[in-house]
Image (cartoon, rainbow, N blue to C red):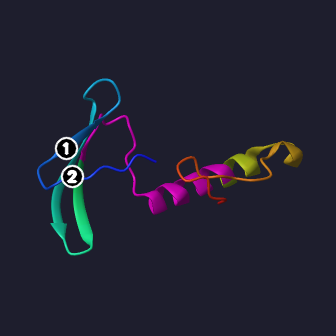
Amino acid sequence: MLVLSRRPGESLVIGESPDIVVTMLEINGKQAKIGVDAPRALGVHRHEVYEKIYQKIVKKAERSACNTSAAPSKTVCHYCSQSL
Protein backbone atom coordinates (compact mmCIF):
# COMPACT_ATOMS: atom_id res chain seq x y z
CA MET A 1 0.00 0.00 0.00
CA LEU A 2 1.31 3.43 -0.93
CA VAL A 3 0.77 5.99 1.83
CA LEU A 4 0.88 9.69 0.93
CA SER A 5 0.44 12.82 2.99
CA ARG A 6 -1.69 15.57 1.47
CA ARG A 7 -2.81 18.94 2.75
CA PRO A 8 -6.19 20.49 1.91
CA GLY A 9 -6.20 21.57 -1.72
CA GLU A 10 -3.45 19.13 -2.74
CA SER A 11 -4.14 16.27 -5.17
CA LEU A 12 -2.75 13.02 -6.50
CA VAL A 13 -3.19 11.42 -9.90
CA ILE A 14 -3.87 7.70 -10.36
CA GLY A 15 -2.67 6.05 -13.55
CA GLU A 16 -0.64 7.32 -16.49
CA SER A 17 -3.13 9.96 -17.62
CA PRO A 18 -4.90 12.51 -15.42
CA ASP A 19 -8.22 10.63 -15.73
CA ILE A 20 -8.42 9.95 -11.99
CA VAL A 21 -7.54 12.77 -9.60
CA VAL A 22 -8.03 12.52 -5.83
CA THR A 23 -8.03 15.85 -3.97
CA MET A 24 -7.87 16.41 -0.22
CA LEU A 25 -10.68 18.88 0.42
CA GLU A 26 -10.84 19.25 4.18
CA ILE A 27 -9.56 17.75 7.40
CA ASN A 28 -11.77 18.03 10.47
CA GLY A 29 -10.49 16.11 13.51
CA LYS A 30 -10.30 12.41 12.59
CA GLN A 31 -12.36 12.85 9.42
CA ALA A 32 -10.99 13.80 6.02
CA LYS A 33 -13.08 14.86 3.02
CA ILE A 34 -11.67 13.85 -0.33
CA GLY A 35 -12.89 14.55 -3.82
CA VAL A 36 -12.52 12.05 -6.65
CA ASP A 37 -12.56 13.24 -10.24
CA ALA A 38 -12.92 10.17 -12.47
CA PRO A 39 -14.69 9.12 -15.68
CA ARG A 40 -18.38 8.30 -15.16
CA ALA A 41 -17.83 4.76 -16.45
CA LEU A 42 -15.51 4.09 -13.52
CA GLY A 43 -17.30 3.12 -10.33
CA VAL A 44 -16.05 4.97 -7.25
CA HIS A 45 -17.37 3.56 -3.95
CA ARG A 46 -16.51 3.56 -0.28
CA HIS A 47 -14.95 0.19 0.57
CA GLU A 48 -17.89 -0.99 2.72
CA VAL A 49 -20.33 -0.16 -0.11
CA TYR A 50 -18.12 -1.97 -2.64
CA GLU A 51 -18.13 -5.10 -0.45
CA LYS A 52 -21.96 -5.15 -0.40
CA ILE A 53 -22.17 -4.65 -4.16
CA TYR A 54 -19.61 -7.41 -4.74
CA GLN A 55 -21.44 -9.81 -2.41
CA LYS A 56 -24.67 -9.26 -4.34
CA ILE A 57 -22.91 -9.93 -7.63
CA VAL A 58 -21.36 -13.15 -6.29
CA LYS A 59 -24.68 -14.36 -4.86
CA LYS A 60 -26.44 -13.66 -8.15
CA ALA A 61 -23.73 -15.55 -10.04
CA GLU A 62 -23.96 -18.49 -7.64
CA ARG A 63 -27.74 -18.67 -8.06
CA SER A 64 -27.52 -18.56 -11.83
CA ALA A 65 -24.78 -21.21 -12.03
CA CYS A 66 -26.09 -24.56 -13.22
CA ASN A 67 -23.44 -26.46 -11.32
CA THR A 68 -22.83 -25.54 -7.67
CA SER A 69 -19.27 -26.85 -7.90
CA ALA A 70 -18.56 -24.10 -10.44
CA ALA A 71 -19.29 -21.42 -7.82
CA PRO A 72 -16.25 -19.99 -6.08
CA SER A 73 -15.52 -21.66 -2.75
CA LYS A 74 -14.05 -18.48 -1.26
CA THR A 75 -14.92 -14.91 -2.15
CA VAL A 76 -12.22 -12.31 -1.57
CA CYS A 77 -12.36 -8.51 -1.78
CA HIS A 78 -10.14 -7.31 -4.65
CA TYR A 79 -8.93 -4.30 -2.66
CA CYS A 80 -8.01 -5.66 0.78
CA SER A 81 -7.98 -9.46 0.20
CA GLN A 82 -10.40 -10.04 3.09
CA SER A 83 -12.86 -12.91 2.81
CA LEU A 84 -16.40 -11.76 2.10
Q: Is residue 64 left or right of residue 38?
A: right
Residues at discs 1 and 2 in contact (Cβ within 8 Å): yes
In the rendered view, tell whether residue 50 sits above or below residue 13. below
Q: Residues within 10 Å of mark 1 (few under 14, many from 20)?
A: some
Q: Position of residue 20 (x, y in %)?
A: 29, 35
Q: CA distance from mark 1 to mark 2?
A: 7 Å
Task: Give the quadrant of residue 33.
Answer: bottom left
Question: In the rendered image of this protein, does residue 18 appear above or below residue 3?
Answer: above
Give the residue displayed 39% in from the left and 52% down from the top. Answer: 45
Q: Position of residue 23 (x, y in %)?
A: 20, 48
Q: Which amino acid type is marked by label 1?
A: Ser
Q: Mark 2 = which residue? A: 6
Residue shown at 62%/58% (left/top)?
82
Q: Residue at x 25, y 28 (%)?
A: 18
Question: Where the C terminus falls, by quadrant?
Answer: bottom right
Q: Nearer the viewer, mark 1 or mark 2?
A: 2
Q: Residue at x 40, y 46 (%)?
A: 2
Query: What crowding class fits label 2: few (fewer than 14 Cα within 10 Å), some (14-19), or many (20 or more)?
Result: few
Secondary structure, mark 1, is: strand
**x%, y% of residue 42?**
38, 37
Which circle marks residue 74 in the picture? none
Magenta stretch encompasses residue 1: no
Residue 74 vertical placement versus 43 (above, below): below
- Mark closest to the chain's N terminus, 1 or 2: 2
Left or right of 74, for residue 5: left
Name the residue tied to disc 1: 11
Q: Which residues are magenta?
A: 36-58
Q: Is residue 53 magenta?
A: yes
Amino acid beneath label 2: Arg
The one nearer the camera, 31 or 55, is: 31
Task: Determine whether the residue tagged by mark 2 lies in a helix, strand or loop.
Answer: loop
